Each structure stands twice: as C-alpha cells, then as structure tokens.
C-alpha cells in the first residue's frame, strides 16, 4: 500500500491470531442491502479479509469470488467457509494489480478499503467499475473523514475517507440506488468498535 511501510506484513500480522479481527458475522450494510442481488448472483468481494462477508453471501446462495492480499486472512476465510459448509473461491490478490477485467460480476462488494490513498483511488475505482457487468450492482461501505475523530476503526487519515459528495460525483453516470451518510454504532470484532462515521453506496452500472 503506497504511503505505509510494509503494509502486507502489517496486515498479515494483524490476522495471525485465531480470533477474527472484524468478527465472523457479516457487515450490517452488506446484510441490509444483499436482498437487492438477484438469486444466485456472481459476486466479487474486494479486500475481503477473513471472509465474514464472502462466506455469508455464499450462505445466501450466491457464487462468490473473494480476494485479499494477506495470506493469513485468506487462510482464515477458507476455514470459515469450511465451517459453514459453503464454497467460496477465496484467492490471494492485491487491489493494485487485480485483473479487474478478467471476469465480470453481477455484484461487487467493497467494505472498508480505506487503506487506498487518494492518489491510487482513481485507478482502484476504475477497476471496481470494470469488474461489474452492465446492470450489475456495486455495494460499498466506507468511512467519512469524521471517522478520524471517532478513532474506532480505519487509518487516522482523513484523506483516505470518502465524502458523500465525492461518491455522488464519482458515480454521477451510474444509477445511484442508495447514498447515505450517517453515524452509527459499529460492532465488528476488535477491529471496528464504537460510534462510526459511515457512508453507504449502492449503485447500478448502466446497461450497455
Ligand atoms: C479494514 S479490513 C476490511 C476487511 C473486509 N472487507 C471486512 O469488511 O471484513 C481491510 C482489508 O484490506 C486488506 N488489504 C489491504 N491492502 C490491500 C491490498 N493492497 N490489496 C488487497 N487487500 C488489501 C487487508 O488485508 C484487510 O483484510
């Protein structure tokens, strides 16, 4: 990750323990918005960590591919899938060289990728867009800059966060189904805990 020393080693070490840093239950936003997905959707979970979201989506009957760059996280994601008796295509991969156009999905799920610095965001978001089929859905939850004052998750860098206005501008050419900026209590393992400044986006890629 540009801007941080040894981000891969840092993240991998965070995932070295037996517990699940962000818990084993899916993110609330993912749970709330997943009913918008068509039955048996193909889904890509980006920087999926220890698999809480990918595994839950597979339990809902979706065909899920997920990647994260930390091998310890991917190993635990595979264990969670096995424990829940579902199949997920869990891979080791980096957002900065993921083959975004190699496959297109009915939905792309992106939860808390605030590690991406502003100078890399354009390229990463171009990748996310390209990974969606025409008519496909992007489900994205991130932190707003105010999150740095809460200090309850995410890096202490305002410029890594999204404003509602930035997302509205970025997806002005898509059908925005939900764009909500709000504060809420988050309880996701040890990693995300307490009042948080969130922004949720659900947007549909225009049909070709
Ligand atoms: C805050 S966690 C969120 C994990 C997951 N989305 C969730 O909600 O549980 C951020 C994740 O990004 C991963 N990550 C950081 N830099 C990455 C990169 N360059 N490519 C892929 N994954 C990365 C970390 O390993 C970590 O799992």
Image (tube, rainbow, N blue to C red):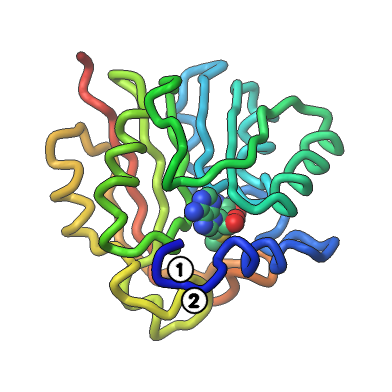
Residue at 22% from the left image edge and 16% from the top image edge? 207
Residue at 38% from the left image edge and 25% from the top image edge? 101
Q: Position of residue 147 (x, y in %)?
A: 39, 76
Ligand 1's image quarter is bottom right
Closer to us: 188 or 50: 50
Disc number for residue 184: 1
Closer to us: 171 or 6: 6
Mark 2: C-beta under 8 Å from nearest atom of ligand 1? no
Q: Secondary structure at mark 2?
A: strand
Q: Position of residue 142 (x, y in %)?
A: 40, 58
Q: Quadrant of residue 118?
A: bottom left
Q: Can the viewer see residue 28?
A: no
Q: Are marks 2 and 1 in contact (CB under 8 Å)?
A: yes
Seen in the picture, residue 61 relative to 24 is either above or below; the reply is above
Mark 1: C-beta under 8 Å from nearest atom of ligand 1? no
Q: CA distance from mark 2 to mark 1?
A: 5 Å
Seen in the picture, residue 1 relative to 146 is either above or below; the reply is above
Q: Quadrant of residue 20?
A: bottom right
Badge 1: residue crowd in 10 Å (few <14, some 14–19, many ≥20): few
Residue annotated with mark 2: 195
């Amino acid at each position: 990750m540009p801007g941080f020393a040894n981000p891969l080693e840092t993240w991998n070490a965070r995932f070295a323990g037996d517990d699940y840093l962000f818990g084993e239950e899916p993110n609330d936003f993912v749970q709330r918005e997943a009913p918008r997905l068509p039955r048996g959707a193909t889904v890509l979970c980006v920087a999926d960590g220890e698999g809480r979201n990918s595994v839950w989506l597979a339990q809902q009957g979706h065909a899920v591919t997920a990647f994260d760059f930390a091998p310890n996280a991917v190993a635990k994601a595979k264990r969670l899938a096995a424990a829940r008796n579902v199949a997920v295509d869990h891979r080791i991969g980096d957002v900065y060289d993921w083959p975004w156009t190699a496959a297109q999905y009915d939905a792309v799920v992106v939860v808390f990728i605030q590690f991406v610095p502003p100078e890399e965001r354009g390229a990463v978001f171009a990748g996310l867009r390209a990974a969606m089929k025409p008519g496909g859905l992007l489900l994205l939850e991130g932190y707003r800059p105010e999150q740095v004052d809460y200090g309850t998750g995410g890096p202490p860098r305002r410029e890594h966060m999204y404003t509602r206005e930035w997302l509205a501008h970025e997806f002005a050419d898509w059908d925005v189904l939900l764009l909500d900026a709000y504060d809420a209590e988050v309880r996701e393992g040890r990693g995300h805990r307490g009042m948080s400044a969130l922004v949720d986006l659900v947007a549909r890629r225009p049909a070709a």
